[in-house]
Amino acid sequence: GYKYRDKKEEGFGYYFTDEYKVTQRLTLDAGARIDRRHTIKQTDSRFNDTWAESNTTIALGAAYRFNPVYKLTSRFSYSKQPAYDWLLKLDNTKQFEPDSRRKYEIGINANYSKAVNLDCTLFYYDISNYKYVAKSQSNKITGETDYYYDSANIAQKGLEIGVRGQLSENFSYSASYAYLHISDKLVSKTLPSNSATVMLNYKNRDYLYNIT
């Protein structure tokens, strides 16, 4: 799905985070990040030594602890990502605009014991100019699959539930389930509505082993 397959580039990231404890129960946090991509050289020499527009993200969060077991969390973030020139467009007459995302999350954490910790998060994402794979076809020259992209304004909402814990000094585990609803029917076909993961970890001195 890329116009220019041979490419040499470098990336730079700048970020800061801060946390402020308002009271013994209430904590606020904030952060910002800027990522920049520099193309040194690629197949199309017109794009040699060029800088892409910056990826920008800001986030604000709050956590309120009711007691030693239960904690309420909330978070808002805004991000903007440029429309990359190397994406193959389904409609070449269409100009891709930058992708902007507003994310709203609220959750509850329950730390019952060292072995059992529960997390539940509700989320709503408002995304403008979301890029998704609208078509794929085999390239007869390269033998590879080319992916053609389109864009849409979408809303994502759903629920994430997780459990994690430390079973012993060496063994830990985590499991999660997520439900996702997407407002656009074409985009929803590219992402699963339900997903689940289970991970078992074993730590032995300086090594960590896991099964997912």
Image (cartoon, helix red, strand yellow):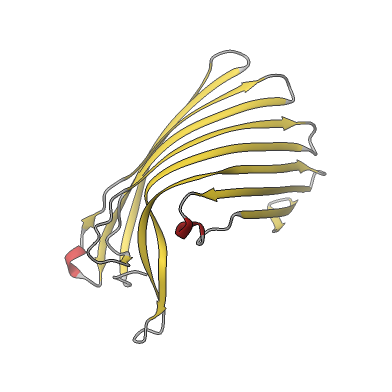
Indicate the quadrant containing the N terminus: top left, top right, bottom left or bottom right.
bottom left
Residue displayed at 45% across by 60% down: 186
In the picture provided, is 29 more to the left or to the right than 50?
A: right
Residue 110 position within the rendered picture, expressed as x and y whole percent measured from the top left? 72, 31
Residue displayed at 56% across by 21% down: 27
Residue displayed at 33% across by 72% down: 5
Rendering quarter of residue 32: top left
Residue 56 position within the rendered picture, expressed as x and y whole percent measured from the top left? 35, 41
Q: Does residue 28 sit above or below 112 in this rendering? A: above
Residue 166 position within the rendered picture, expressed as x and y whole percent measured from the top left? 77, 42
Residue displayed at 30% across by 46% down: 54
Q: Does residue 148 sit above or below 183 in this rendering? A: below
Q: Residue furthest bottom?
A: 140
Q: Residue furthest right?
A: 168
Number of labels in the image equals: 0
The foreground one among 66 and 170 is 66
Indicate the quadrant containing the C terminus: top left, top right, bottom left or bottom right.
bottom right
Q: Does residue 113 sit above or below 200 in this rendering? A: above
In the picture provided, is 178 more to the left or to the right than 129?
A: right
In the picture provided, is 2 more to the left or to the right than 166?
A: left
Rendering quarter of residue 62: top right
Residue 105 position within the rendered picture, expressed as x and y whole percent measured from the top left? 54, 35
The foreground one among 120 and 134 is 134
Q: Residue furthest top?
A: 23
In the picture provided, is 151 more to the left or to the right than 70?
A: left
